[in-house]
């Protein structure tokens, strides 16, 4: 059975190494969100550094998730002192559990604060796609899919929760997203 891969990417207003209260708050909230999402039904796994420190992304060993990569439009630093981004890569059993984890609870609260921490870039900040069971998506896969989504819009190759697709490529509806598509406004 296919699994849903979910890649998120955001450009932070300040580097990860910044000791300012807002950066510390972002870390504290992020750690709590990761713990909660890790217990969510439908969650399978996420990319984690094999051995590394906070802010160490580019030099880290990500194991089967591959070498860390970022979209071509990211123009901030790439060292521990200058990196100003947050990215996640995770696997889910299906669309609905992933959607539910992202848009409820602690993660929803964090999303409501995203503009305190992240810049508005004009680019999509997440992308979904299907992988075969047993396949671990890589950071490069996530970047490629996010860039494809930006350039071509939602398609079976790279899509959002709002314009999603089933594993067979047919359009899918994720329960709980906004008004029903068949409603007239």
Image (cartoon, rainbow, N blue to C red):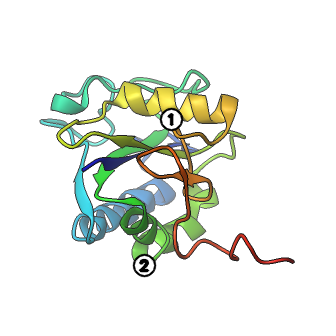
Relative depth, front residue between 65 and 145: 145
Q: Residue at x 50, y 70 (%)?
A: 103
Relative depth, front residue between 92 and 52: 92
Does residue 62 appear in this view?
no
Q: Earlier in the sequence, mark 1 or mark 2?
A: 2
Q: Is residue 137 above or below residue 24?
A: above
Give residue 132's position: percent from left, percent from top: 27, 39
Q: Is residue 39 left or right of residue 118?
A: left
Relative depth, front residue between 155 and 103: 155
Q: Quadrant of residue 122?
A: top right
Q: Is residue 164 above or below residue 75?
A: below
Does residue 97 appear in this view?
yes
Count how many numbered circles sit on residues in the image: 2
| Residue at mark 1 | 157
Give residue 90's position: percent from left, percent from top: 32, 48
Q: Is residue 50 left or right of residue 117?
A: left
Q: Which mark is residue 105?
A: 2
Q: Is residue 28 left or right of residue 25?
A: left
Q: Residue at x 22, y 36 (%)?
A: 135
Q: Which mark is residue 97?
A: none
Q: Is residue 58 above or below residue 18?
A: above
Neighbor class of circle 1 (other Cα within 10 Å; few <14, some 14-19, many 20+) is some
Q: Is residue 60 left or right of residue 12?
A: left
Q: Secondary structure at mark 2?
A: helix
Q: Residue at x 55, y 27 (%)?
A: 76
Give residue 112's position: percent from left, percent from top: 59, 70
Q: Secondary structure at mark 1?
A: loop
Foreground disc of the pair 1, 2: 1
Q: CA distance from mark 1 to mark 2?
A: 29 Å
Q: Quadrant of residue 64?
A: top left
In the displayed orientation, state which residue is furthest to the left: 51
Q: Residue at x 53, y 26 (%)?
A: 71
């Amino acid at each position: 059975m296919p699994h849903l891969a979910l890649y998120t990417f955001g450009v932070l207003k300040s580097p990860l190494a910044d000791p300012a209260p807002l950066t510390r708050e972002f870390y504290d909230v992020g750690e709590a969100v990761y713990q909660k999402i890790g217990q969510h039904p439908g969650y399978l796994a996420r990319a984690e550094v094999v051995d590394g420190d906070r802010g160490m992304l580019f030099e880290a060993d990500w194991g089967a998730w591959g070498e860390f990569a970022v979209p071509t439009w990211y123009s901030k630093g790439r060292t521990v002192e200058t990196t100003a981004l947050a990215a996640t890569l995770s696997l889910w059993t299906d669309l609905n559990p992933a959607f539910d984890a992202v848009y409820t609870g602690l993660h929803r609260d964090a999303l409501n604060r995203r503009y305190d921490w992240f810049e508005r870039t004009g680019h999509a900040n997440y992308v979904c796609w299907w992988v075969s069971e047993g396949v671990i998506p890589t950071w490069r896969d996530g970047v490629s899919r996010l860039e494809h989504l930006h350039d071509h819009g939602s398609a079976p190759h790279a899509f959002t929760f709002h314009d999603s697709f089933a594993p067979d490529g047919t359009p899918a509806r994720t329960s709980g997203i906004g008004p029903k598509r068949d409603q007239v406004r």
